[in-house]
Amino acid sequence: MAISRVAVVGAGFMGSGIAESAASAGIDVTVFEPEPAPLERSRGRLSESVDRAVSRGKLSAQAAQVLVGRIAYTTEMADLDGVDAVMEAVTEDPRVKGKLFASLDTQLPDAQFLASNTSSIPIAEIASWTQRPERVVGLHFFSPVPVMKLVEVVVALDTAGQTVACAEQFATAIGKQPIRTKDRSGFIVNMLLVPYLMAAVRMYEEGFASREDIDQGMRLGCGHPMGPLTLCDFIGLDVLYAVCDSLYEEFKRPEYAPPPLLKRMVVSGHHGRKAGQGFYPYA
């Protein structure tokens, strides 16, 4: 069955990007947050993004207007009734996600799938809060969502084959390349990426090299588009810390453990680019 209307729960940076990508593909989107302020910020992000696309000639003014018109914003869960699928992008807290999925499972018995954008929490743990765990799947998008083509489709123990096929079809329909992964902490990308990033943080923490030289070494020596410390700031140090914690909890391998410096930066509010301060200062 084709998906024509989806719900995005969580209007932060990731949720806003998912909503924009779906609307760009001709799908109607309802974005939910319990408070109006995040919804207004999401509207602003969308406006900036489509204005930028129009100014660069990637989108006509008329197409931009149509895209914006496909997205509705609400503070009422009842407005999600009748959606074909759900994308969740709320805080990385298993209890918050679990309670949300329990509610969505009851409210939306006919939805084809309930997907989490988690980067670290086991999908099986989230699905355990529902009465229909076969409908729960991971769809892990990458930031910024409208630009990044990859989506990890995370298959939990009880996820049905039909759910996986539907989720992959949806990802393809909105212009993404799905790759399938088992439900292990870190999935594919973060399981490979985190040890590299943490090695860079430790190198900087120990005074082995400056932040600029670490980043330039990987950009100019390995052809990476950005250095590891810049990438940490871009991802968000709080998000990265949660991923490290999850990986270390599951595998108990030292390369996944967050270094002390990372913890100190997170508790100090130095969360990277979004906070104006991380390994580098940002205007």
Image (spheres, helix red, strand yellow):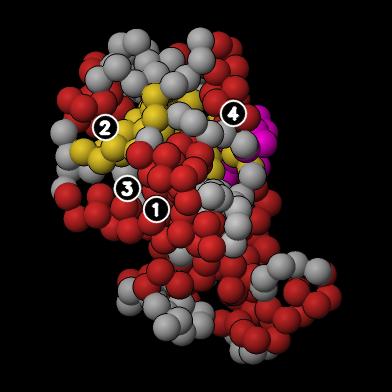
Task: Please state which of the two labelled residues, at mark 2 or mark 3, is closer to the viewer.
Answer: 3
Q: Which label belongs to residue 173?
A: 4
Which residue lies under the disc numbered 2?
100
Which residue does the image show at 48% across and 36% down from the upper left? Answer: 22
Tag 3: Cα neighbours inside 10 Å, few (<14), some, or many (≥20)?
many
Secondary structure beneath dot 2 equals: helix
Secondary structure beneath dot 3 equals: loop
Q: How many numbered discs sit on the rendered protein?
A: 4
The question of residue 4 being in magenta is answered with no
Which residue does the image show at 54% across and 57% down from the upper left? Answer: 53
Asked which quadrant contains residue 33, the reply is: top left
Q: Amino acid at mark 4?
A: Ala
Which residue lies under the disc numbered 1?
46
Residue in the foreground of this view, choosing between 104 and 192: 104
For marks 3 and 4, give the CA distance. 21 Å
Tag 4: Cα neighbours inside 10 Å, few (<14), some, or many (≥20)?
some
For marks 4 and 1, give the CA distance. 20 Å
**Which one is earlier in the sequence, the residue at label 4 or at label 1?**
1
Q: Which label belongs to residue 29?
A: none
The x, y position of residue 31, in whole percent, is 31, 39
- Mark 4 and mark 3 in contact (Cβ < 8 Å)? no
Q: Amino acid at mark 2?
A: Leu
The x, y position of residue 158, in whole percent, is 49, 16
Q: Is residue 43 left or right of residue 233?
A: left
Task: Please state which of the two labelled residues, at mark 2 or mark 1, is closer to the viewer.
Answer: 1
The residue stretch that appears in magenta: 176-188
Q: Is residue 148 left or right of residue 36?
A: right
**Which one is earlier in the sequence, the residue at label 3 or at label 1?**
3
Which residue lies under the disc numbered 3?
11
